[in-house]
Amino acid sequence: MTEASKQLPRIAVVTVLFRCEKFMSGLVESVAAVDYPRELLTFHLVDNGPGDGTLAAAKSAIEQVAGLLAAVVIHEPGTNVGFAVGNNIALRAALDAGADYCFLLNPDATFEPAALREAVHAAASAPDVGSVQSLLVLGDKPDVVNSSGNCIHYLGFGYVGGYLRPRAEVPAAACDIAFSSGACLLVSAEVLREVGLLDETLWLYHEDLDLGWRIRLAGYRNVVAPSSVCRHFYEFSRASSKWYWMERNRWIVVLKNYRLATIALLLPLLMVTDLGLLLMAAKAGWLGLKVRSLLWFLRPSAWRYLWRGRREIARIRRASDRQLLEQFTAVIDYPDFRNPIVAHLVEPVWKLGLMLARVLVRW
C-alpha cells in the first residue's frame, strides 16, 4: 500500500443485480477504471435474480478485466429478496470486513473515473455530512441531468431534482439535498451504524428516501457532489405493481419518521391527497393496488413494526420536524407529473399546507 493510499478510506461498492444482464459489461468496466486505489476497494454483487443471466454476465465481464478490478465478493441469497434486503446483505458483510464507506451503485449505472475520489472528498469536507450523492447524468445523454439531488415532498413523495436540466447548469459546489439517490449513494460506516441500514420492510421504493430522512433526523446532512459523476442508463418502470410499493411506503415513512403532533397536523391534507390519488388510480387502472397499499395498515403486524420504527427514530433524533420542513417541498417538480390540474388546483393547496406547517410546527 502506498503512502497516499494510507490516507484514503476503504470503500465497499455495493450493487444488487436483477434482470440487468445488458448493463454488466459497462458496470464492471467502470468499476475497474475508477480512479481509486484497488487495494482499498471491494466490489460486492448481490444476485437478486438467480437464473436470469445477470450474474453469469457479470462474472464474464469480471474475467475480461482480470487484474484491474477490485476484490469481488458475490452474495447469492437464492431468490429476489428486494432492493433493501439485497443491499443490506452486502452492507453487513462490508461493515464486518472493516469498510469505512459504502457506495450503493445501481446495476444500470456506471462511474466516471473520478466519481469515488470526489465523493469521498465531499464526505470528508465536514463532520456533519451523512451521505453524498454523485451527480447522476443520463447514460446515453451525459450532458443531461438525471438527478442533481433528490427531493422530499412534505406529504412523503420523493422525486429526482434537476431531471432533464443541462449538466452545464448544475453549480460546481457541493450543496445540501433532501436525500441521496440509492442509485449512487456514499455513506460512512459510522453513520450506518448510528442510523441503521435500509428499512427491509419497504422492500422496493422509498428505501433511500427513508435512509436520507433518518440521516437528517440524526443531525447529519445529505449533499450532492457535482464533481462526482455517475451515468445512469435510466428506464422509467412501467410495471403497475410499483404503485403499491410507492404508495404503501410513502405512508410508512410519514408515519414512522414524523412526530405524532406533525402527523396530526398534516392528517387532513394527507387524507384529501389520498382521495385525489384514489380517483387518479381509478382513472389510470391501478385502483386495486392503491386500495391494497392502504389495507396493509390494518394488519396488527404493521403497527407493531411502525411502533418499533418510531422508537428507533426517537433514539437517533437530533433534528426537529421544523428543521426538516424547511428543506421539504410543496411541489413535485418532475416533468412526467406536471399537468394543469396539479399546477392550478393541487399545488396551491399543498403550498398553503406547507406554509401553515412551517408556522405551526415548533417541535
Image (cartoon, rainbow, N blue to C red):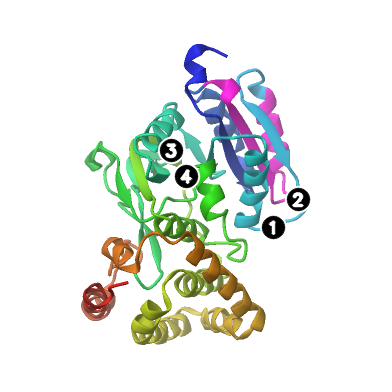
Residue carrying label 1: 81
Give the x, y percent position of residue 76: 75, 46
Discs 4, 2 touching: Cβ within 8 Å: no
Q: Residue at x 53, y 12 (%)?
A: 2
Relative placement, left or right, of 23 versus 179 is right
> Residue 185, labelled with which disc?
4
Q: Amino acid at mark 1?
A: Val
Of marks 1 and 3, which one's residue comes earlier in the chain?
Answer: 1
**Closer to viewer: mark 1 or mark 4:** 4
Q: Nearer the viewer, residue 26 or 296?
A: 296
Mark with earlier residue (2, 3) = 2
- Residue 244 percent coordinates (x, y): 55, 73
Label 2: how many Cα within 10 Å (few below 14, some 14–19, many 20+):
some
In front of the other: 188 or 159: 188
Q: Are marks 1 and 3 in contact (CB under 8 Å)?
A: no
Q: CA distance from mark 2 to mark 1?
A: 7 Å
Q: Is residue 261 visible?
A: yes
Q: What label sits on residue 122 in the rendered view? A: none
Q: Which stretch is magenta?
A: 37-63
| Residue placed under numbered mark 2 in the picture | 77
Residue drawn at point x = 72 percent, y = 44 percent:
53
Query: Position of 174 compared to 282: left or right?
Result: left
In the rendered image, residue 120 lying in the magenta stretch gets the answer: no
